[in-house]
Image (tube, rainbow, N blue to C red):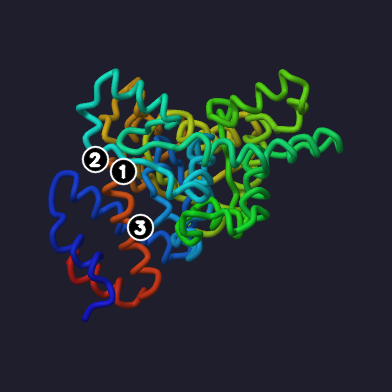
Amino acid sequence: MTNTPILEFVLKNYKNFNSRATRDALIAYWKHIDAGGQMFWAMAGAMSSAQLGITLAPAIREGLIHGLSVTGANLEESLFRLVAHNSYKDFPEYRYLSKQDDTRILNDRMRRVTDTSIPEDEAFRVVEKFVLPMWARATEKGERRFWHEYFYELVLTMPEDLFEGKPEESWLLAAARANLPIVVPGYEDSTFGNFFSARANAGDCDVSIAKSGIEYMTALYKQYAVLSEGPGAGFFQIGGGIAGDFPICVVPSLKYDVGVSVKPWAYFCQISDSTTSYGSYSGATPNEKITWDKLTADTPMFVIESDATIVAPLMLSALLECKRHPAEARTLMESFTR
């Protein structure tokens, strides 16, 4: 029996349209990793609530992902899934909910995210009990940290008997254990960003204990220098918005603003179910990024117009097969791409 059934399925069946883009992006991703390159992920949307951690966490552990840019919501929602998984409620027929139905969900202290919901008491309030003392201690000591560092400490020190989700499926826990480089641009736009603002407004903590987005970019300058060594750093993007727009700018900013020589991104792939276009909310097409010196004409570029909750786990599962059985993966790719 083959050790790479998912990879073989993709190579055999994904021939045209978005399936071809998926296949080609997968092959190029693996060839970049296999050659010693690194991959930086940008994750927008509600991927943590959609349980992308099932495949994202092992991909982090096995060295397929080397840095992340995530929204504040994705960061905290990975923790929510870990501590409150059994209290989530799904709404598979969400398309047919009425305003009254959603009002009942509100009154049940659930916060709907498409077809699932985050339980306020079991998620928000449980995490709140841990994070507020952490912020208070930082205020007392005059410490300043990046937003994700508070969540790293929290997930690493929280009693494991509070975990309802599977620890091996928490990408935040995997990233924290690996001390993976992360940027969280616009973290203010999240549940705990709002909570932090309220606590700072009340005088319970000092707003300066959370480092700014500008400081995230200056940290990314240094991180990119390491990530881009050797064959360079690839950029894998889910969705649009600030999670992708912020980190991809590190290349032209280093080149034009800082004034140092820097490698361009060595690979680019975006998965989005909103068509990319010039000026689109979902992000510019890869060619437009050439004009901003983020990519070059030689950069392998892929746009997969599909649902990331379908495509990303498929690609990650195939890539995990490649990582575990590299020789077999190479042979299989050669046989299907001759």
- Which image quarter holds the N terminus? bottom left
Task: Pinpoint residue 177: horizontal percent, then vertical percent.
Answer: 61, 59
Category of crowding for the residue at label 2, using alpha-carbon neighbours closer than 10 angstroms: few (below 14), some (14–19), many (at least 20):
some
Residues at discs 1 and 2 in contact (Cβ within 8 Å): yes
**Given the image, on which type of amino acid does mark 1 rest?**
Ala
Residue 83 vs residue 35, the one in the foreground: 83
Q: Residue tagged by mark 2? A: 306
Residue 255 vs residue 49, the one in the foreground: 49
Category of crowding for the residue at label 1, using alpha-carbon neighbours closer than 10 angstroms: few (below 14), some (14–19), many (at least 20):
many
Q: Residue at horizontal 62%, vertical 27%?
A: 195
Q: Earlier in the sequence, mark 1 or mark 3?
A: 1
The disc at residue 182 is none
Task: Pinpoint residue 77: horizontal percent, then vertical percent.
Answer: 49, 41
Asked which secondary structure carries label 2, the reply is loop
Q: Residue tagged by mark 1? A: 308
Q: Residue tagged by mark 3? A: 316
Q: CA distance from mark 1 to mark 2?
A: 6 Å
Residues at discs 3 and 2 in contact (Cβ within 8 Å): no
**Given the image, on which type of amino acid does mark 2 rest?**
Ser
Q: Is residue 288 above or below residue 82?
A: above
- Which image quarter holds the C terminus? bottom left
**Given the image, on which type of amino acid does mark 3 rest?**
Leu
Asked which secondary structure carries label 1, the reply is helix
